[in-house]
Amino acid sequence: MSQRFLRPDANLRGDVMVVGGGISGIQAALDLATAGFKVYLVEKTPTIGGKMSQLDKTFPTNDCSMCIESPKFIECDRHPNIEIMTYTEVAGVEGTPGNFTVTLTRKPRYVDEDKCTGCTVCVEYCPVKIPDPFNQNLSLNKAVHIYFSQAVPLVTYIDDTCLYLKDKTCSICTGVCENDAINFNQTPQKVQVKVGAIVLSPGYEIFDPKIRGDYGYGTCENVVTSMDFERLLCATGPHEGHILRPSDKHHPRKVAWIQCVGSRQVTPGGNSYCSAVCCSYTQKQVILAKDHGPDMQATIFHNDIRSYGKDFERFYQRAEKLPGVTFIRSYVSVSGEDPVTRNVKIRYSTTDGGVKEEEFELVVLSVGLNPPAGASELAQKFGVELGPQGFCKTNPVNPIETTRPGIFLSGAFRGPMDIPEAVMTASAAGALAGQFLKARRGRLSTERVYPIERDVSGEEAKIGVFVCRCGANIGRVVDVPGVCDYAKTLPNVVHVEESLFACATNTAKAIGDTVRDKGLNRVVVAACTPRTHEPLFRDTLREAGINQYFFDMANIREHCSWVHSKEQADATKKAKDIVRMSVARTSLLEPLQEFSLPVNKGALVVGGGVAGMTSALTLAEQGFQTYLIEKASDLGGMARRIHYTTDGLDVQAWLNELKKKTYRHQLIRVITDAAITEVSGYVGNFVTKVRTKGRVVELKHGAAIIATGADEYKPTEYLYGQDARVMTQLELEEKIVAGDEQVKQARSVVMIQCVGCRQEDRNYCSRVCCSGAMKNALKLKAGNKDVDIHVLFRDMRTYGFAEDSYRAAAGQDVKFIRYEPQDKPQVEVDGAGLKVTVRDPILGKRLALEADTVVLAAAVIPSAGAEDTARLFKVPLSPDGFFQEAHVKLRPVDFAAEGVYLCGTAQYPKHLSEVIGQAYGAAGRALTLLTHDTVVASGSVCEVNESMCVSCGACITSCSYGAIEFHATPRGRKAVINPVLCKGDGLCNAKCPTGAVFLKHYTDAEVFGQIEAALAG
């Protein structure tokens, strides 16, 4: 819910305040509120959404960014335990952990939020045009405007450029507002809120290249930043998704991207660290730009390609293989601008042709991530410390803790990170704040109450069709008014209207109002994909007092405007066909009832490494019985082989303490030497059988966390296993700690990166290897500064703050030689030593390196039992064999199977701090289930018509979830479906030879009605 203007003496109490309303703050608020805490979500801009709302698509899936984020806006707005306070800044924090008093300053909108309906009549009449901040100042808006179309709250605010605020010469908006919402008497308002804990999620700022004039930005008109380009790509951008260069509004045919702008720099004004996301978002922009204009020529100037994340390597290869796309490894300079064409001249070096100069019609600067604006002042207000890079300082073994108890951290205030990490840390912050305030859970929270559902069983179908323009995503291709006119002619349709964004808060509310006012009993929304928005609109029907299953989505974006963007007439015809089919199906829909299931308060954690122990302790500390299953004879996992980190952590001392806490905790039952033999049940009520030490135990639990870790690849190349002087990085680390004489006496060490990965059979980056090599190289140098170390690499992927260790190694005379995958290094025995031969692409010659020790950066590979675990819990694996999360961006620790969660290297290789953060995140997500007494199951499940069942068993063999079995009836054995276990995939429906099985909400009558409607066109 959005907080309106309050009396200064208002007594506001909550459990947690989340400061920052980007995607990380939103997720933290939702997790905490769902787990039973009262949350205040504070955002300094006029709306929640953060930087993610400005993005066009997200890598590596190229999902529409706003499409996957905006449903969470409304979820926050409708949640009874979340109070949203936008256009609000923190003025001060007093008190002690568990009893903070936060003073807020609410800036005046000069608009009464209770009265404003978001109609934008005031915007239409306002005479003052200003650069639009949401569109990166690439287009104009008005002095009074809504920040963006799906904003929450969806009300206007008045900018300081307003003529009335300047000199009281204009008050047109006051006169045209029919709701008397304009209020120029508003002043800044001080509000105090008492909370027990605080989550800091202020996000980040984009590096501003204009300050130093980097690469002509601010002087050359056709040099833009990557965020500028996001808005150019976006259908809600300045040119409705047409990529037009600023100088002449022409489509550029030759575009250059320059990487590492503001990052990996030690010059004044730059940042020494790697911003972690720039390589992949550049590849995304290249792919999308090529979709917009297939004939476009794209050149990417880069240093290293840091595609270190899950599926990032394939994403890079996808971009690289596009026709007309060239990646050039070179530093560059902008030498000038053609005064006539305004083309930008770039000078760069080549390995074979010296320095070249080339003109480009548009240049995009891949800018890095800075700490949030005012980070120093923010840190001072909250009493937390900042690190040397200007981001929030954290505990090395708990990246969610700040230096002040009771104040936690989520998102990019910790350091540059991608959206999944921001979401993981949000859930982690929710878990730790919940642990801190466990005694007050549920005291201030309330349950959401829906109106009584209207019985429409005796009514004829009265269908309302709502057609969405989705900004320009649909509207610029599909003739939306034409589709609306056509929908009015369809049987049973009594109301049709169009909207700019059906998912905007005012539109969603208007749909509910229309259902009530016009007596509608079925609704069709013709818009985007039901995958992201169907829950939102079903919830809207519930608020309107209609059964949520009287709803259908006609996807006219993915199925029409996006795939037929050049065929407007055909796209419109297809949209009409899809709407006709949807209306035909909707007229036959029946009301279904969801049912509540009891939740067992226990949890099962599979895997006793750092991730598993961290998750187990987090759950147990909040009062939940936890079973920790480990296949080995002791806890610790791969961390038992890690001894130190680049920031000086004694890993083994810390690990021993973690193990001690785990073994001693009264609510954790550790079962070692264990193997899971069977998993049955469903969300909230699982039964897992575990074989351990000759006996089988049965464990009942409501949630499960998969934390089975990963393994180290055992190389078959480079003489590994044949010569003791060839070892892996982990083995080297163990030898360094043990004081091994061979390592101590080594005069020459050669490290070879990317061993066993970034190749055809393992087409991914193992993420940790480059940083691990730097860590060990620096440790070797610390023991013997004269040791000669060569690192043979393809791309140095020391992303984030690990860039400092790369620079430190280079500063200590560690030498780096890049090799190409088609010409890998060769290792051979040479007399008493080893010889490594590698081609240096800069010198263009093969080098022979003498080596006492060769160290291989062996790939991180999926754990040996991953396939068995996936089969038992009925969860998927990725193409690379790691566990596959429900959504790569917004559900990174959830599985599609409800009640099962994921963390650690079982999901993908990651560093120790990332493992810990994700483990807290998985526990946080599990807590959103375990803190409730019941869980709701879908009404769209299968049933069997026993009179038609011939007991063939085809349905039983086809069901992946064990939901079907035979039971005795007076007429013999018949199949029966357990609705609790059924996932509604309909496979049994298709397999049944007699048609005895039917899927509710997708009955034969409904589906055939759709098909007949399609053929009728």
Image (cartoon, helix red, strand yellow):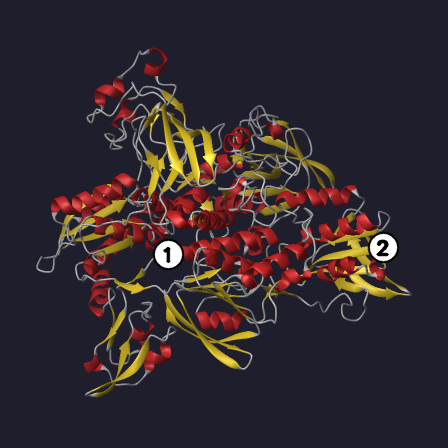
Residue 818 lies left or right of residue 179; in this view the side is right
Q: Is residue 546 left or right of residue 906?
A: left
Residue at numbered disc 2: 748
* In this picture, residue 879 sits left or right of residue 20: right
Residue 931's tag is 1
Q: Split into 4 quadrants, where in the image is the N terminus?
A: top left
Q: For the residues carrying marks 1 and 2, which lies nearer the camera in this image?
A: 1
Residue 826 lies in what quarter of the image?
Answer: bottom right
787 and 680: which is toward the camera: 680
Determine the secondary structure under disc 1: loop
State the SS at label 2.
Answer: strand
Compared with residue 499, is residue 1001 higher up or lower down, i.e. above or below? Answer: below
Residue at the (50%, 48%) spot, across then down = 425
Q: Where's residue 911, x and y in %?
A: 61, 53
Frontmost residue, 457 versus 293: 457
| Residue 908 in view | no
Q: Quadrant of the C terminus?
A: bottom left
Identity of the residue furthest to the left in this view: 458
Report x, y in % for residue 28.
43, 46
The picture places residue 751, in percent across and down from the top left corner, at 76, 56
Q: Residues within 10 Å of mark 2 (few under 14, many from 20)?
A: some
Q: Residue at image x 53%, y 64%?
A: 879
Residue visible at 62% across and 39% down in the picture: 260
Amino acid beneath label 2: Ser
Measured in 3D between alpha carbons, the distance from the residue under mark 1 to the one under mark 2, in whole angstroms, is: 57 Å
Q: Is residue 10 visible?
A: yes
